[in-house]
Image (cartoon, rainbow, N blue to C red):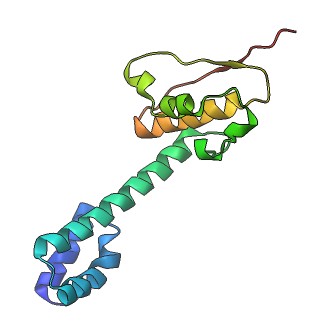
């Protein structure tokens, strides 16, 4: 191995990069073929590394959140409950209420998706805002 390659491998290891070693030679060949600049080549490598690290971070935070199951808001059938305003739910999913330090309570009878909405938002909150301890609560609003 050439001294420059050894130093490069050592630097990659010290930075903790996992994706770059997998794609380095492919991207180098592509850059040479397309006569890409050094900055374009480096940018592509680093962008892929960033995406990989972000995906790994989300997977780790999802496991640490200890949610009973993994569901997304996209999997929620909004048409099942016509009284739900999809625009409002999507707005709540941005979690602006967390930044404004506001509370959110879902009220409604059983079976309308309150629990799932809470789980999705709690998962998103923990992951995207790096919050380790939070709870969203759904109340049964039916009279007995």
Up/down of 30 relative to 19, above or below:
below
Q: Residue furthest right?
A: 144
Residue 106 image-quadrant placement:
top right
**Residue 20: % across, % down:** 29, 72
* Residue at (43% x, 56% y) in the render: 55
* Residue at (50% x, 28% y) in the render: 92
Residue 24 image-quadrant placement:
bottom left
**Residue 79: % across, % down:** 71, 38
- Taking the image as shown, residue 126 lies to the left or right of residue 120, namely left
* Residue at (70% x, 42% y) in the render: 77
**Residue 13: % across, % down:** 26, 68
The C terminus lies in quadrant: top right
- Taking the image as shown, residue 86 lies to the left or right of residue 81, namely left
Up/down of 75 relative to 126, above or below:
below
Q: Residue furthest top?
A: 143
Q: Nearer the viewer, residue 137 or 134?
A: 137
Residue 52 image-quadrant placement:
bottom left
* Residue at (46% x, 40% y) in the render: 127
- Taking the image as shown, residue 24 lies to the left or right of residue 131, namely left
**Residue 30: % across, % down:** 25, 85
- Taking the image as shown, residue 45 lies to the left or right of residue 108, namely left
The N terminus lies in quadrant: bottom left
Q: Nearer the viewer, residue 81 or 16?
A: 81
Labels in figure, total? 0
């Amino acid at each position: 191995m050439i001294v420059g390659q050894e130093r490069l491998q050592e630097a990659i290891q010290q930075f903790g990069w996992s994706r770059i070693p997998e794609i380095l030679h492919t991207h180098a060949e592509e850059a040479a073929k397309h006569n890409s600049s050094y900055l374009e080549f480096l940018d592509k490598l680093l962008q892929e590394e960033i995406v990989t690290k972000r995906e790994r971070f989300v997977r780790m935070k999802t496991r640490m959140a200890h949610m009973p199951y993994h569901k997304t808001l996209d999997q929620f059938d909004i048409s099942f409950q016509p009284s739900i305003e999809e625009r409002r739910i999507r707005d709540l999913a941005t979690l602006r209420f967390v930044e404004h330090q506001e509370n959110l309570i879902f009220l409604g009878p059983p079976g309308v998706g309150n629990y799932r909405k809470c789980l999705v938002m709690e998962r998103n909150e923990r992951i995207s805002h790096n919050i380790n301890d939070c709870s969203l609560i759904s109340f049964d609003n039916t009279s007995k």
